[in-house]
Amino acid sequence: MSYQSIWLVLLFPILGFLIQSLAGTRIEKALGRKALGAIAVFPIVLSFIVGLMITIGIKPGEPAPMVTLGDWITAGGFRIPFEFIVDPLSMTMVLIITGIGALIHLYATGYMSDEKEYARFFTYMNLFIASMLVLVLGGNLVLLYVGWEGVGVCSYLLIGFWYTDIANAKAANKAFIVNRIGDWGLSLGLMLIVALLATSPMPREMVGMDHRFLSYDVMLPWLETVLKAHPAMATGIALLLFVGAAGKSAQFPLYLWLPDAMAGPTPVSALIHAATMVTSGVVLLNRMHIVFEFSPVASAVICVIGAFTALFAALIAFGQSDIKKVLAYSTVSQLGFMFIACGSGAYWAGMFHVTTHAFFKALLFLGAGAVIHAMAHNQDMRNYGNLRKYLPITFWTMILGTLAICAVGIPGVFGFAGFYSKEAILGGALANTHAQIGGVQLGQIAGWVGLGVAALTSIYMTRLTCLTFLGKEERWRSIPAQHHDEDHGDAHHELDENHTPHEVPPSMWIPLVVLAVLSVGGGFMLSKGDAFEKWLYPTDLSVLGHVSTEPSNIPLALYSTIAAVGGILLGLAFYLKGLPKNQGFDESKWSPLRRAERDQFGFDKAATVAAVEGGGDIARGLWLWVDNGLINGIVEGLGSLSAGIGGLLRRWQSGTIRLYALMMLSGLVGLIWFFATVVAKGGR
């Protein structure tokens, strides 16, 4: 299929959105809920098929074609076309978004089958996919920004889908507000790029193309030329773009919104965490990599923040009892790995992990949804146990997903998906010499931190597996009522001793099986012969030189294997028989470290207090001193002055004719005296 058909990839989800929003309820009444679900899933499947056919025809290394549908904004000689870029980066994301998105949509038809507002849910889901496609396919910075904001709005709608629950509404608000901070950085970064290019001469070979200077095929080569002459500008632009990426991709300190996003339905969690929103920042860093390569300082900052985020989130995961919260902090941690890769210059490795992470994290979230569905929407792992007996398909698929995220593999033989991408990231960081500040190789330090976090990942994921599928089921046979976690509106009911978990329907387990296959063999196929690296960046990526992902004198494959397998063995040793008593329902018996991990080391509360209560205090102070004191004082003072002057003048307006005659006489005498004085002075 010709790349000219790329517009169909976006058209199908938009049509799905329009049908669901305008006629969804009527279709459901006329044809039934299954038909409405099919209408929701079918457009995403069609987009995937078209995207796959176009991707097969791409020849890496050739100039990326731009498909223009027409001018969108015109002002004099300047115009912004509605254009798509068809290159390996954009098409990789198209396949992830539509492929994983289609599986999640299929899963959602079963998971949300009891939901009253079925059409509204899929309206938001289709629009979310369409917004993400605009972000990755847009051929210029303006379209990227439109898709960026569209994804933010859709995440707000989906996280707050059950908006009558105040917790869900607050989570949606938190996601929207925190992302505005990141969007502020992105906006300033894009404005700085525009200002820099607008004041710089266009390279001779691009003369005549200034009317579309924001398009990637014009802007990126021009920006590279300008930054060579003004390298100091690179750091400012790079740091601002990084703030935007950190907001969408949940890097410290802007990670706060992502764990709270678990308030939304589980398919939403899977879509946000695996296939769409959180990968936006990594896509941005890859698309604008030229800027970061001119700034060792910005690259070092990205490495440090990525490494700290990975470690911080991994530690917090140990203190969580909610199965979705564990996976949420796992996502934050894995995003940290992706930023380590980009900061180290191994951009392809970051995108490689985006791809493999989409496989196993979608699997783990959907598997968690199957567990929650089977356990009457109770999300507390302390209430689980021995579920492998009742959920065999979910159990085995989640085992494979766990092995993939733990990066288990045999060097030189075979490994699960995460083994290949995580090793590429750590290799790129340990071999990096670009990301440094003051001669300190911060990229290499981030690599060693990442290796330690890989071991922690294996431990807390083994903890999740043991508590959910192993152990004894007596724990959930007699669950205290106060530990029921109502998360699903009318579909929720409480567990009791007569509850029997059951495997999910085919619409829910088929996506699990497909994702399990990808989690097992996807990384192996993409890494074979450096296939993914050559596909994404067939020529030398770095404008400053080759970026190696093979550190010398470091047996990385051996260290990675020890971290993965050692972590799993430690997890089994601690949690195979269930939770220790000092980690059970009585949280007062938890250790100080465990309570600190549960509470995010106090950061979330401190940030919330500073932002909400602190913002309120500032607002009240401004009202008291500025509005009520200064502004009201000025207004009231002017009013009092006017009233005083008016009072004085009013005394002369008594209505007495003799007083008016006296005033006229006095005025006449005054005028005679004035002119007499002027004449006298003129005479001298």
Image (cartoon, helix red, strand yellow):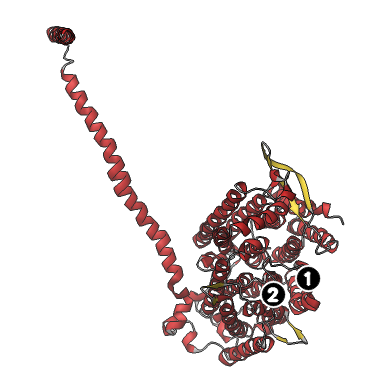
Q: Quadrant of residue 677?
A: top left
The residue wearing badge 2 is: 360
> Is the residue 155 above or below the residue 561 in the image?
above
Residue sitting nearer the eye, 472 or 467: 467
Residue sitting nearer the eye, 337 or 533: 533
Residue sitting nearer the eye, 76 or 228: 228
In percent of width and height, residue 59 lies at: 84, 63
The residue wearing badge 1 is: 534
> Is the residue 672 above or below the residue 234 in the image?
above
Q: Going from the N terminus, do you reach mark 1 or mark 2 first?
A: 2
Question: How many angstroms separate mark 1 from mark 2 (CA)?
Answer: 23 Å
On-image quarter of the C terminus: top left
Residue neighbourhood size for the residue with mark 1, other residues' Cα within 10 Å, grouped as few (<14), some (14–19), many (≥20) = some
In percent of width and height, residue 79 lies at: 69, 42
In percent of width and height, residue 244 lies at: 57, 59
Look at label 1 and name its amino acid. Lys
For discs 1 and 2, the disc positioned in front in the rendered view: 1
Could you tell me if the residues under marks 1 and 2 are in contact, i.e. CB atoms within 8 Å?
A: no
